Structures are given as C-alpha cells and as structure tokens.
Image: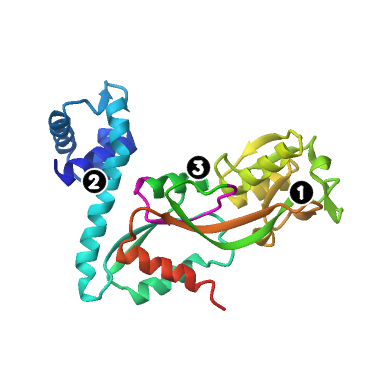
Amino acid sequence: MELRQLAYFVAVAEELSFTRASRRLRVVQSAVSTAVRALEREIGAELFDRDSRRVALTAAGAAMLPEARTALAAARAAAQAAAGAGGEVRGVVTMGTILSTGRVDVPRLLGRFSRHHPQAAVRLQYSPSGSAGHVRAVLDGSMDLALASLPGRVPAGLAQEVVAQENLVLLAAPGHPVAGRAAVRLADLADESFVDFPVGWGNRTVVDRAFAEAGLSRQVALEVSDYDTARALIAQGLGVGFVPEGAAGRLAEVVAVALAEPLRWSVSVVHSAVRPLSPAAAALLREVRAELEP
C-alpha cells in the first residue's frame, strides 16, 4: 500500500468525484482511477460505489477514510520532523479559523509566523459547518490545529486551550421594539424571527442551548455564514440575531442590545491530544499563544 494511493483515495472520498479529485491533485483522472482500483484489489474490498451520476463511499471506504487520513498526517509529520532536524521549520500547516477570534489577530500571527519561519507555509481554512467541522477535521488528521468555539464538553482526543471569552449581544434593526432597551431577556424574544448561523457554529450552539434550557422555542427564519449578510438582513427588519460582542461594533446600520442573562461565548485553539504536532504546527501554536501575551 502506497501513500500516493491513500492520498488519491482521500481526495476522491472528500470530493465524491474522480474528476474533482484529479483537478485537486493535479493529475490525470485515469491515474486517480488506477490508483484507487489498485488499492481496492490490495485490500480486497470496493471503496466506492460508482455509476454515471454519482460516487459514494461504501461501508469499507467509510471505515478506511479516518485511518487513511491519520496515516497521511503521520507521514507529513515524519517528513517535516526530518526536514526540521537541522533546526529550520519546514512544511505546510493546515489551520482552521472562524469569523470571530477574540484577542487572536489571525493576519498578524500569520505574518509573524511567516517572518520567523520563511520555509514553512500555512493553509488557512473555513468550514461550512463552523467549529464542528474544524473539530472533525482535527480529530481525523486532515487539519493540524484550529481556532474554534466549543460550548460544552471537549470531545475525546482533542486538546483545548481557551484564548478568548466574551458575551453574545443581540442585533436588531434601529426601529425594532427591543432596539431602545438597555437589556432584554430570552423570554422577551420567544416570538421573534432570527437570523442565525448554521448548526455547528459555536455561537449558534450557545444560543440554541440557552433557549432549550429555558424551555423556550425560537424560529430561525434565515441562516447565513458571514456577518455582513447577517447585518444586512437584520437591518431590513427580517429578524434579530446574536453575535459576539467584539464583532458587534463593526456592524453598522444595526443596534446591539445586551442580554439580561449574559450568554458567554469562547474561542479555543484545538489540536489532537493523541498525535504529536509537526514542528511547523507546534511553531504556529506558539504564535497563537504569543497573541495572548501582554
């Protein structure tokens, strides 16, 4: 079994398309198909169900995917460790981030990392499923570390360091009845329509849990994946919405209202607790920590 075969298998599994996988890998499609079929013959099981319209993982493929990612991550770490044996940090680090990162200035820390380690590179990624997507990627080895919001219990196998905490605030259009209030209670919002972020985003999880624990239901009429769109929809009176307090000051045309029962939101840097970080990933983690120094 070759690492190249595993890399091709993972690309097809993530893209669910041999064509898209070949573009991503920058090789001809026939090479990807040949490598995957050779891997299937070697393990004695089909990894994909294929027809003219779709590609889907079989049960064997789904079982193999996390282990293949782990093997590739270990191979990358080994190569980076060998390359850095002379003291110079090399390699590529994959880091997840989210819209709000509190005290951590991501562009600044990446600039500092680049100046300190010019032979290393960072791939910065956002996930459509927010922090939940980052956690899955870190656990399966496809991401080295991430800035994420993790309300509740930390998943097994994940190391977490909290880097920022702040309250969530409610955004409303200037003419909305709650806009002139000093603070609102969750019970006051039970009949409102909400503009919110997708399930899996940390701030969405905090709000959903708070309403559920209070025995309240709410209607999320619109889901968005960026602050500008949320602001524009709220400014048009299409709903109210929650954002971290640090982000509210950057959003014009809406009013930020405090909650009488504060909802705390946090950002953590997370990485695997069972796989060692590569030298490049460890160096990037040090730069994240440096952001917190006075």
Secondary structure type for disc 2: helix
Mark number displayed over residue 25: 2
Quadrant of the drawing holding the C terminus? bottom right
Would you say 287 lies left or right of 237 here? left
The amino acid type found where label 3 is placed reads Ser
Res 220 → quadrant: top right
The reply to whether the C-beta atoms of the residues labelled 3 and 2 are less than 8 Å apart is: no
- Asked whether the viewer can see residue 60, the reply is yes
Question: Closest to the observer: 32 or 251?
Answer: 32
Question: Spatial distance from mark 3 to mark 2, Cα to Cα?
Answer: 24 Å
At x 26%, y 53%, the residue is 74
Name which of mark 2 and mark 1 comes first in the sequence. 2
Residue 108 location (% of width, % of height): 48, 71
Q: Is residue 87 magenta?
A: no
At x 21%, y 71%, the residue is 85
Secondary structure type for disc 3: loop
Mark number displayed over residue 133: none
Res 121 → quadrant: bottom left
Mark in the foreground, 1 or 3 = 3
The reply to whether the C-beta atoms of the residues labelled 1 and 3 are less than 8 Å apart is: no
Residue 154 location (% of width, % of height): 52, 49
The amino acid type found where label 2 is placed reads Leu
* Picture layout, residue 264 above or below residue 116: above
On the image, numbered disc 1 is attached to which residue? Answer: 172
Magenta residues, start to end: 140-152
- Asked whether the viewer can see residue 58, the reply is no
